[in-house]
Image: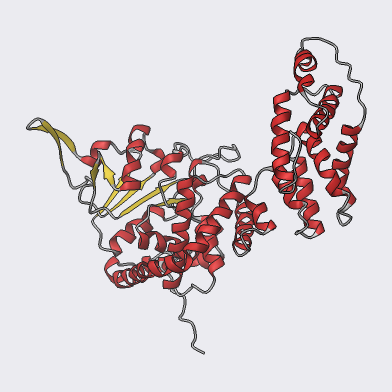
Amino acid sequence: MTASPPRTFFLRTLGLAGWDALDPVVLAAVASEAPLLLIGPHGSAKTMVLNRLAEALGLEHRHYNASLLSFDDLVGFPVPQEGRVVYLQTPATVWEAESVLIDEVSRCRPEVQNKLFPLVHERVLQGMPLPKLRYRWGAMNPPASLEGDDAGYAGAEPLDVALADRFAFVVTVPALAELAVEEQRRVLRPSRWSGEEARPEVVRLVEEARAGLDDAGQSDAGAATEYAILLAAQLSRAGHPLSTRRAAQLVRNVIAVRAAAQALGDGDDPEAAFLVAARSSVPDAAWGRPVPFEKLLAAHRSAWAAAGMAEGSARRRLLTEREPFVRLAIALEGTLPPHEAAEVLSDAYSALALPERLIAAALVMPRLTKRRDLPAAALEPICNDWAEVGKPCAASVTSGPGTRWVRPLLTTELPKLDRKTEKGRVLSAVAANLLFRKHEFRLEELLAAWERAVAALRPAGRKVAA
């Protein structure tokens, strides 16, 4: 049996210790020439590593401090010439650059920040392409949390959401205190570094990773797409939705990280590569709402597990389905173990508003009476609401400023219900119960809830009276 080649450390070739976990992400960004944003405390080597990377690759590099940056610094000085404006280039302008580092990007003035969108995303400035520009990098301190639980950095504003979304990889780098003691020793130990000496190894790794992109695309594109769909659904439920562009970028990032991991001799654990790609594909930290790692890990584990399931399986559908009525229906299909079905049933039912719960109770009780395997605790709220719907209610609602909604219901709207139909009987009973509770509602809301509930909870082919 042939032994696996030893793991190669990409960032150590740049003279950087303590960042081994970020090797596949940074290498993936370089190999795919995708925009990369590093977020970390001052003095954490963000700027150093990106400048060294440009030096090791032998690039024509530009390093701009965004807090001092004016648009003229990028394009040059405008000069009228023969009825048009041309830009007088300087050694600092961006036109001949192969790589650009926008340092302290979150301190950039808004009017300049807006003009960086096409530079980062499309390699275009003032509508003119930048054919030589291959690498777009940014660095910033973490902004103050939007939740107000930390002080952040004075002057470090949350990055514009649209600009942050243009960076393919958004990577939070470690502070010294977050490293293990031995890693801290390696970081602090004086060392000598030469870009010329590092170049052969850096170029070799980048070329190997780049060569592996096509293979990874063919082997991993399908799995990466399914994973992105499932992860996006889980993160949305956790309050961190991904834009369509970001979900598509996640697919590309997974492929690039897989290729980078293979080049580093660390490609035997695809799940780890998917998690690394996910962590660096969620840009929320750039605008002060970082996803807690435990939330991201839970979302990743669910998505990873479900990606291997049959597309129509109950567990997989539950991961992407948000409509509570549909989740109730899935729980009652009989394909989930009783304890899982009970958990989904309770969760979905509690997500419904009171009028929706009463309608759902009336519709699902006939099916629940046949499910002797479900624990009573999961059924109790539904049974209680069903009993309320079936209970005669003598509603007495006096007229007043807070109950003016009642009169049109009683005199105009509710009489429209046909009590000869199941729909009319159920909604009349629900309406009476809501009136008894003095719970304000409108008939059109009940009708809409009924249609949604019936569409989800009635077995296909069974007719319901209109």
User: Can you name the residue that lies furthest to the bottom here?
Assistant: 1
Task: Give the camera-side residue of 191 and 351.
Answer: 351
Q: Is residue 7 above or below residue 140?
A: below
Judged left or right of residue 294, residue 453 is: right
Count every numbered label the image shows and give the total.
Answer: 0
Vertical side of 249 occupied by 411: above or below: above
Q: Look at the image and tell me whether residue 382 can be seen.
A: yes
Q: Nearer the viewer, residue 204 or 271?
A: 271
**Percent x, y of residue 286:** 48, 44
- Does 402 sit left or right of 281 as displayed? right
Image quadrant in which the C terminus is located = top right
Name the residue furthest left.
82
Would you identify the image quadrant in which residue 264 lies? bottom left
398, 158: nearer the viewer: 398
On the image, the x and y values in percent for residue 156 come to 45, 39
Residue 274 lies, with reference to residue 102, above or below; the image says: below
Give x and y (percent) for residue 443.
Answer: 73, 24
Q: How is the image coloured?
A: secondary structure
Q: Is residue 172 visible?
A: no
Q: Position of residue 166 (x, y in %)?
A: 40, 46
Q: Residue placed at 51% from the left, 50% from the top?
A: 282
Above or below, 312 against 87 in this view is below
Nearest the eye: 141 or 207: 207
At 89% across and 49% down in the image, what residue appears?
369
Residue drawn at (29%, 66%) of the image = 195
User: What residue appears at the point 55 percent right and 61 percent down from the top-left corner?
Assistant: 275
